[in-house]
């Protein structure tokens, strides 16, 4: 035990001495946003945000708002915790906005006038290990929509009525890791209520 403590201290001292860069991570957000009118706003989709959410009742939807100042491609990646209570949960992801191709209609989604929906479901879910928490996830739809300047909404839903937790990664670049107090919250979220 003493050896480990001394080694940890030595490694920390060397990192400080040689100007080690801070660890990079997504910015975690734990939010409940069930109404499009009060959708959680994402201010910068350049940097990766991990939206930790849940569909807690059949037919539930969670909404997030993205406002783009100029046209760009955004990165979206939907994940479900690999835990017993979420093993069968496979939600869908939708982009709602002006000029979005209408691929799928879902009656439970709120769609403001003048906007349309592109929904993505994946029949193939792989596996993904989150580099920040080392937690294992089922990896679902990865989507890179090219969007014009404007306001868009992201919606996570399950048209089969499934319930469970998810993480939606939005953005490309990792940011310096926030304090690590959120890791425990991510671990509790990963348990899916088990």
Image (cartoon, grey):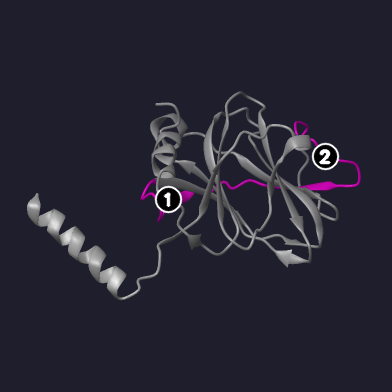
Question: Which type of secondary structure does the marked residue at label 1 adopt?
Answer: loop
Is residue 127 found inside the magenta-colored segment of the image? yes
Mark 1, Cα crowd under 10 Å, few <14 / some 14-19 / many 20+, is few
- Residue closest to the eye, 12 or 88: 12
The magenta stretch spans which residues? Answer: 106-135
The residue carrying mark 2 is 111
User: For the point 85% across and 53% down, which residue is it?
Assistant: 98
Residue occupying the far bottom of the picture: 18
Cα–Cα span, label 2 and label 1: 37 Å
The residue at the point 53 percent across, 40 percent down is: 166
Front one among 191 and 105? 191
Q: Residue 154: percent from the left, percent from the top?
A: 70, 46
Numbered badge on residue 164: none
Q: Position of residue 115 (x, y in %)?
A: 86, 47
Q: Is residue 162 above or below residue 74?
A: above
Q: Quick one: quadrant of the C terminus?
A: top left
Q: Residue at x 59, y 39 (%)?
A: 91
For the residue pair 121 and 156, the one nearer the viewer reads as: 156
Residue at the limit of the structure toward the left, as seen here: 2
Q: Which residue is mark 1?
A: 179
Specify the quadrant of the image occupied by residue 31: top right
- Residue at point 79%, 66% (across, down): 70
Q: Position of residue 135 (x, y in %)?
A: 38, 46
Rendered image quadrant of residue 10: bottom left
Q: Is residue 62 above or below residue 137?
A: above
Secondary structure category for the residue under label 2: loop
Give the mark nearest the N terminus, 2 or 1: 2
Q: Is residue 124 magenta?
A: yes
Left-right relation of 83 to 118: left
Q: Is residue 86 left or right of residue 93?
A: left
Q: Which quadrant of the view contains residue 161?
A: top right
- Number of marks in the rendered image: 2
């Amino acid at each position: 035990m003493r050896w480990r403590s001394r080694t940890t201290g030595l490694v920390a001292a060397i990192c400080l001495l040689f100007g080690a860069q801070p660890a990079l991570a997504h910015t975690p957000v734990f939010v409940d946003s069930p109404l499009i009118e009060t959708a959680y706003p994402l201010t910068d989709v350049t940097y990766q945000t991990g939206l930790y959410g849940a569909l807690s009742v059949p037919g539930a939807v969670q909404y997030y708002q993205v406002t783009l100042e100029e046209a760009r491609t955004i990165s979206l990646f939907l994940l479900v915790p690999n835990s017993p209570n979420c093993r069968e949960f496979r939600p869908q992801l939708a982009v709602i906005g002006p000029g979005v191709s209408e691929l799928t209609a879902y009656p439970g989604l709120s769609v403001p006038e003048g906007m349309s929906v592109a929904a993505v479901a994946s029949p193939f879910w792989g596996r993904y290990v989150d580099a920040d928490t080392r937690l294992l996830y089922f990896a679902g739809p990865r989507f890179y929509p090219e969007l014009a300047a404007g306001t868009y909404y992201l919606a996570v839903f399950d048209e089969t009525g499934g319930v469970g937790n998810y993480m939606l990664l939005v953005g490309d670049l990792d940011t310096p890791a926030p304090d690590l107090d959120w890791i425990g919250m991510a671990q509790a979220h990963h348990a899916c209520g088990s």
